[in-house]
Amino acid sequence: MKLLAMCWSALIIMYIVGMKLRSKKEKLTWVESAMNVLVYLLVFFMGLRMGANKEIVDSLGTIGVQSVLVSLITIVLSMLGITVSRMILRMDRYGNVGEDRVPKGQKLQKEAKANVNGIKSTIIIGLLVVVGMSIGYFLIYKKWAVQDEFMVVSDPYLTACLIMLIGTVGLNLGLDGSVFRNIRKAGIGIVLFPIMAVLGSAIGGVIYGIITHFSLREGVAIACGFGWYTYAPNVILQAGYPVASAVSFLHNVIREVVGIIGIPFLTQKIGYIEACAVPGVAAMDVCMPIVERSAREDTVVYSFGIGLLMCLSVPIIVPLVIGA
């Protein structure tokens, strides 16, 4: 919660700074480039830490298949929940409704350009994660065997990078000046989309419990970690379910990584708002800048709302379901 408070503070403070500098927006074109650099740096750094993380490495062989399965089910159903909501609200896959819809010819041009940028970002981010994990595994985990010390030493740098990135998002939103207008424009969607994303994951947990050897209780608890791999697995472990805890841990890591790598691609191929549901809790911090780069500034409103509700839901749903 301390990290969350720092990120929100950075977002709000830099938003105010951006408002003050709005008249000089033309001279601050470097903000977008700075955001790109910070995104790539953060993604590489996270890959490095994941490759050096003993729990993640040790979990890959034994529970990898189960973790991939529950991740696939929950991500698909969360996105499906948002698609259904979007159809009810008569939105297109870009989050536009009514007069905001782009004419067909113009839409095809924008779509082609966005597809190229989305694929390019996905490839770059994917490569950075793979390179980071490889270096973390082969050098830090295997060769130097100092993973614990590395985690402790690197944690402040990761936190600082994340806060700077969120601050840059705040600055960009402040310079744009449309955030409150976008919230009003979102209407009931700002509530409906997060609810449906959470409900989709919970239903996914039920399905996962039915088709595997895990109980419904374990399945829902695993699915409703929403990418919060430092909390949900510990609650499940304390309740006396060690195997489910291990699956929960790796599933939550996978969900965040898929969001980091896949958002640029999914925004163009599936939908702007659907992509926000993929990383779970990370939609309101780590992945929010990626959403902004891959979609539009107004999509950040949905991303933040989905991540916030998921963050608030984990400490309620997981202990309640697992009986902790």
Image: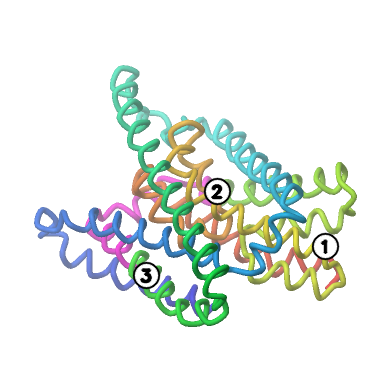
Mark 3, other Cα within 10 Å: few <14 / some 14–19 / many ≥20? some
Secondary structure, mark 1, is helix
Q: Is residue 148 above or below residue 84?
A: below
Mark 1, other Cα within 10 Å: few <14 / some 14–19 / many ≥20? some
Image quadrant holding the N terminus, namely bottom right
Q: Please check the rendered image and state whether residue 176 is part of the magenta-colored stretch, yes or no.
A: yes
Q: Amino acid at mark 2?
A: Val
Q: Amino acid at mark 3?
A: Cys
How far across and down, in percent of the image, does residue 222 sit? Answer: 75, 58
* Residue assigned mark 2: 258
Please state the total of marks drawn on the protein image: 3
In three-dimensional space, the C-alpha distance between marks 2 and 1, rounded to whole angstroms, equals 22 Å
Secondary structure, mark 3, is helix
Picture quadrant of residue 169: bottom left
Labelled disc at residue 161: 3
The magenta span reads: 167-190
Labelled disc at residue 294: none
Q: Nearer the viewer, residue 170 or 209?
A: 209
Q: Is residue 138 above or below residue 268?
A: below
Q: Please check the rendered image and state whether residue 228 is part of the magenta-colored stretch, yes or no.
A: no
* Residue assigned mark 1: 243
Q: Earlier in the sequence, mark 3 or mark 1?
A: 3
Mark 2, other Cα within 10 Å: few <14 / some 14–19 / many ≥20? some
Q: Tell me, what colour scheme is on the image? A: rainbow
